[in-house]
Every structure is written in structure tokens, then in C-alpha cells.
Image: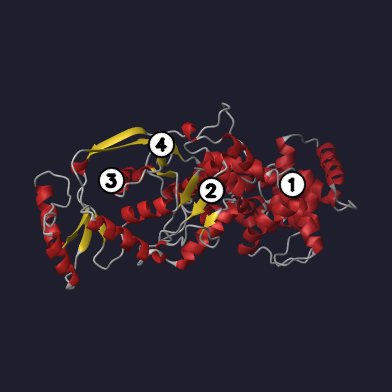
Amino acid sequence: MSVRVRFAPSPTGLLHIGNVRTALFNWLFARQSGGTFVLRIEDTDAERSEKRFEDQLQRDLRWLGLTWDEGVEVGGAYGPYRQTERFEIYGQIARQLLDSGRAYYCFCSQETLQRARLGQLADGQSPRYPGTCRNLDPARSAGRFASGEPAVMRFRVGEGSISFSDLVFGDLSIQSKEVGDFILLRSDGSAQYNFVVVVDDLLMKITHVIRGEGHISNTHRQMLLYEALGEAPPRFAHLSTILGPDGAKLSKRHGAASLQEFRRQGYLADSMVNYLALLGWTPEADGLELLDSGQLVSQFRLDRVNKAPAIFDENKLKWINRHYLGRLEPAELVKLVVPHLVARDWMTTPFSPRVKTWLENLVVSLRKYLDRGEDIIEATGVVFDFNPQRDLTEEEFTLLRTEDSAQKVILELRNHMGQVGELNEAAVGRVLARVGENTGVRGKALFQPVRLALTGKTSGPDLKTLVPLIQAGSHLDLDRAIPGIDERIACVLSQL
């Protein structure tokens, strides 16, 4: 049978890094093996499931390029692909288990179960169902249930061990006594997770289940259901937990938690796919870290997935993203950063072709300062947000006020800038050379006052590239007026 894998999220929130890594590994395995990638929605948690989350997770997957071959919105031979549309199927399979004696009705109230739980905890035992209704006469139980008495349906767990061989963690085994008789159907007729997952994976002919390490305990229960239904289970591969740099489970305090937030910050889809693939998997070539989706597909193997916890390192993600930003065409780079400029009220859309050309030149000149799209705010602050009164520190103003050479440099800069015709890189280079010659100032003593006068900052992009862009921007019709070179120099001089 050809490989069939599934990604089965619950639409109870936004996709986080762990979800996306699971989806990616399933997609890579399907593509590498020529198999089928199924998207199934596990929406049985009626109180928390929302259509907006389902819609968003589909948009997120498509943005990453993780298109599915079968499932919601696509269809296929084994649908429907939302669990809330499959309740009749679950009921039929549950009745089969009931008729075969592998399941039974349980009439215990929540109060009874809670008393049993507290007693087990007091005795130092792990809480599990005590089997109160396990040996009730099936015919009498059926009658009580038919009369309307509330009941859940439980699976009858036998004695012995429960074992399976995991493709990542190896052979895993527990004693069945560690697993209580778990619920298949709730009293309202809705089905529990472990039951519906087994039914869906069987009927959708899933061959490999690739999911997070936290599901290992569920797998033991699910192995019992496969055996009770007389069906061979799929192969399992559990992915290790993702931890933050401090060794704690990844959370919001380690940075953006949802994929949507990473996207808002200006990370690229290619960067996210590349980086997430490296969380728990290593390519065959040592040191190879920059791989596009085609390379990932060709190299991906489950036997190279690690069982050690993966460490999320946002600095490495930024490094990878910077690589992919460097490959963008100017128009694509502008498209990425403009939402951040608009959100800061520095410009609005749509804009004229002239503004578009200027923006392309500006962002390309600043590309090396960008790890993410939102970094454009800090990078272009010297252009859009010139405010020396606010930004210059006391130390920097002291330099301008007390160093005779600094004042001479700025005055000389004003004189020569006023004589320039077309302001381009070559012209700026000539001005800086003349200022140095006429003042006798070199190095930091020359360039720091010049940069302070033109940008209000002590460091930043190359002035020969930046200054013409500032001057050109001052002549554009923008919501946020950009001060020209003469205005900037005059503003700094007025502070001395």
C-alpha cells in the first residue's frame, strides 16, 4: 500500500510551532515517498472549536506551501474529513465493540468517579477507572441505557502488556493495568479522542501516524482498539518536544508562539519551512542548514528524526530568514515591509510608481539590516523619523557642542551640500572628501558628526547610498514628510 499520512489539528486556536512542525514532517514524508497527505479536522471539542480557526489553519498551511492531496475543502474517497460529520460512523463501530464484549455501559456519576479518584490518590495510586460497572450484566445494562439512564461507553482493557515499535523512540511497552477502562462514547453520544482517531485512521487507510511525543500515552490505548477491531495498526513516529533555549517547554515567553505571529513579524514561508525541518531532523550532509522545500523533500527520512528534544533558537531562525530575504526581488521585498511602514503611519497605500521605485531602492539598500520584515521600522527610522532633539543622547550632543572639529565638520558639510547639483553616491563621496580636506579631520572624528547631522544617529547604513535616498524622499508626496538634507543640517546646528 502506498504511504498515506494525515495532519489532524483541532480548530481550537492558532497553529503554533509544534503543530506546524508536525504538519511539515507529514508533508515531507508524503512527498518524499510519493504518498498522500490528508488534512483532517478533529473538531469534536464543540465548546472550543471555531470555524475561524479552521479557516486560518488552512490559510497558514497554504502560505507555507503544505498543500494537501485529500481532506477538507479538497475531498477524497474516505470523507467526510471533519469529525463532527462522522458521528454516525463512530456510533456504528462503538456498537460493534459493545456487541463483541469489548465495551460496556458505565452508569457511574461524576461524584462517584471523583470519590474513587481521591481514594486512589490518597493510597498513592495513579487515578484510573476502578471498574465499578465492568461486570454488570450486558442485557440489564442495555435495558437501563434504553430507558434513558445516562451512561458512557467504556472500552474493556484486558490483562498483559501493550507494546509497539516507534520509528523514532524504538520499542515502547507498558502494562495494561496502567490504563483504566477508558471512555469511547460520552453520555451525550459524542466520541472521545482515542476512539475517533483509531476509527478515522483505519477508514482513511492511514499507513503512518507522525505526531508529537505527547501522544505516546494515547498510542498505547489506541493499540488496544486496533487489536479489538481485528485491524493492523499504522506505523507510529512520535516527534520530540520542542523546548526553548532555557530548556523549558516552548511558550510565548520564548518569542512568537503562533505561526500567524511569525508571519506578522515578517518571516518568510521558505524560512519557516527550512528552519522547522531542522527542529528534530538532520540532513545527511553535515553542516547543511539552508535547504529549500525541494531539497528537504529529496533528503527527508524518518530514520534521521531525532528523539532528543529540539531547541527552538530564534536567532538561528533570523539568520535563515536573512538568507531568504537576500533572495527576494526588490518588489517582493517592498511588498513584505510596506505593511509595517503603514502600521507605523509612515506611509499609506496605494502609492505612485515613483514612490514604489524609491521604496525599492531604499529597502534594497537596507536589506542587510533586516532579519524580519518588521525590522524595516528601525532600519528606516533615519529616513522617516528624523528627530535629533529626541534621539541624540547627552554624550552625543556634548560631542557636537564641545568638539571644535565636530562643529567645523558640520558647517563645512552644510556649505558643500548647498553647492551640489544632482545628489548621488558619487557627489556625496566628493562632498565628504572635501569636508575632510578642508577641515583636516579624518576617520571617526569626520564621519560621526556628519552622520549625526544627517541622520540623528551615530551608526547606520552607508552614507553615500543613504543620503541621496533621503533627499529624493523629501521631494515625494508621502503622508510622513521626510526632512531634506539642508533641513536636517540646519536642525542639528540649531541645537548647538
Q: Is residue 114 left or right of residue 462?
A: left
Q: Looking at the rendered structure, which numbered label has been put on residue 327?
A: none
Q: Earlier in the sequence, mark 2 or mark 4?
A: 2
Amino acid found under the numbered disc labelled 2: Thr
Residue 299 occupies quadrant: top right
Amino acid found under the numbered disc labelled 1: Ser
What's the distance in space between the residues labelled 1 and 2, CA to CA? 44 Å
Q: Nearer the viewer, residue 478 or 76?
A: 76
* Label 1 with label 3: CB-CB less than 8 Å: no
Nearer mark to the viewer, of 2 and 4: 2
Q: How is the image coloured?
A: secondary structure
Q: Residue at x 80, y 35 (%)?
A: 440
What's the distance in space between the residues labelled 4 and 1, CA to CA? 39 Å
Residue underneath mark 3: 224
Q: Earlier in the sequence, mark 4 or mark 1?
A: 4
Is residue 315 visible to us here?
no
SS type, badge 2:
strand
Residue underneath mark 4: 309
Mark 2 surroundings: few (<14), some (14-19) or many (≥20) residues within 10 A: many
Residue underneath mark 2: 36
Is residue 32 visible to us here?
yes
Residue 404 lies, in percent from the top left, at 72, 42
Q: Nearer the viewer, residue 25 or 309?
A: 25
Q: Earlier in the sequence, mark 1 or mark 3?
A: 3
